[in-house]
Amino acid sequence: MREIILVKYGEMALKGANRSTFEDVLLRNLRFRLKRIGRFSFSKAQSTIYIVPEAKTDEESAALVDAVMPRLKKVFGIAALARARECEKDFADISAQAVPYLRDALTAAKTFKVEAKRADKAFPMKSPQICAELGGILLSAYPHLKVNVNEPDVTVTVEIRDSKAYIHAAREKGAGGLPVGTAGNALLLLSGGIDSPVAAYMMAKRGLRITACHFASPPYTSERARLKVETLCEKLTPWCGSIAFYCVPFTEIQEELERSCPEEYFTILMRRLMMQIAQEIAKEENCGAIVTGESLGQVASQTLQAIACTDAVARIPVLRPLIGMDKIEIVDISRKIDTYETSIQPYEDCCTVFTPRHPKLRPDPDEVAEIQNEVDFSEMVRRAVEGAEKKVFAQHIAEEQGSVTL
């Protein structure tokens, strides 16, 4: 019998009548993620998705499983996954398959236990009997082992399903959350720092498909700064799926702000104009929200009053998943998703251009609006939107790690 992958989902199982919709999106995401690695068949039953390599030999099947397991751990909607041996629904076949299949796991262990999940209640052996009988067979095959039902080194699981039985020795934790695409689309303001890529990851985990928007101000910002942000998009694709990336020319607006507006209001006015531009791109991309990496009180533009001034020009929701997090928590996630080292590269973005010496910490929304209205930015905003360059970053999972040729 072949080796397959069992995909388990947690939160999706609570979706009631809508669960099938979430399952279908997850299946679509899985097919897309794995299509360049090899051939697989997919099916779903009882809160489990079965991924079966279409291979001619056990060795080829195992090679495909090896290739896809790291990728599956980055697919939102998966709570846990396990590589498993498929068996006939016959205890003799289960025990015969279990001894050789579990060799590596049990040889390295000192203690183990057996768990049985008997979804097919017509199976003649009850769960305690399966555990006892298989446990005795494994003890005979691996006499160095001892049974420990509380904290075993290895938990051997036998699942009795409708058509087949499955054996596996370890469930690995998945990315969790909801499948990307089930919550709609959102536009991320991607600065190039540590925070905004983490915000993208967190909202993708809640099912949002991410489009990214970056503001560039050449010659004040360099081409290396733009390439840095594009690299961040590439690093996010294993988690977020394909990302449409917009690079918006912002030099004209920033130079006008420096000429025409009080210095202490420069940052908050810049954020408002970014929000106005972002909303036009969000409309074009059918995005229902804007995502930022703001954390309350982290910098001058992230006080409650400054956030209120920014939101005053927003016509769609602004989501701030990092709002209550401290920097250490954010950095920890950035390391986990492999964006940290790129984010700290010393190429400045436009948010550091013309930084005021003493920014206004508690701006008044009406006063800020009055100052902004003294200059007609409408044409500059239009030119920035029209001048935005779009680039799509596809998922690089297969390209980065190679495909398996059978």
Image (cartoon, rainbow, N blue to C red):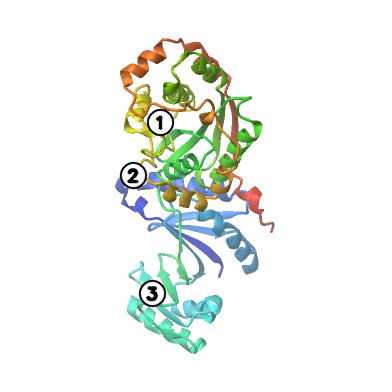
Judging depth in this view, the residue of 55 and 399 nearest the camera is 399
Where's residue 22, x and y in %? 40, 46
Where's residue 378, x and y in %? 47, 12
Query: In the image, is residue 326 above or below residue 138?
Result: above
Q: Earlier in the sequence, mark 2 or mark 3?
A: 2
Picture quadrant where residue 129 is located: bottom left
* Mark 3, secondary structure of its residue: strand
Q: Earlier in the sequence, mark 1 or mark 3?
A: 3
* Mark 1, secondary structure of its residue: helix
- Tell me if residue 269 can be seen: no
What amino acid is found at the position of numbered circle 1 in the picture?
Ser
For the C terminus, which image quadrant? bottom right
User: How far apart are the alpha carbons under marks 1 and 3?
Assistant: 54 Å
Q: Which mark, residue 209?
A: none
Q: Which mark, residue 115?
A: 3
Q: Residue beneath label 2, please?
A: 18
**Nearer the viewer's eye, disc 1 or disc 3?**
1
Picture quadrant where residue 383 is located: top right
Q: Residue beneath label 1, please?
A: 301
Picture quadrant where residue 358 is located: top left
**Nearer the viewer's eye, disc 2 or disc 1?**
1
Judging depth in this view, the residue of 67 and 98 nearest the camera is 67
Q: Is residue 204 left or right of residue 65?
A: left
User: How far apart are the alpha carbons under marks 2 and 1?
Assistant: 40 Å
Judging depth in this view, the residue of 25 and 46 nearest the camera is 25
User: How far apart are the alpha carbons under marks 2 and 3?
Assistant: 31 Å
- Count of numbered tags: 3
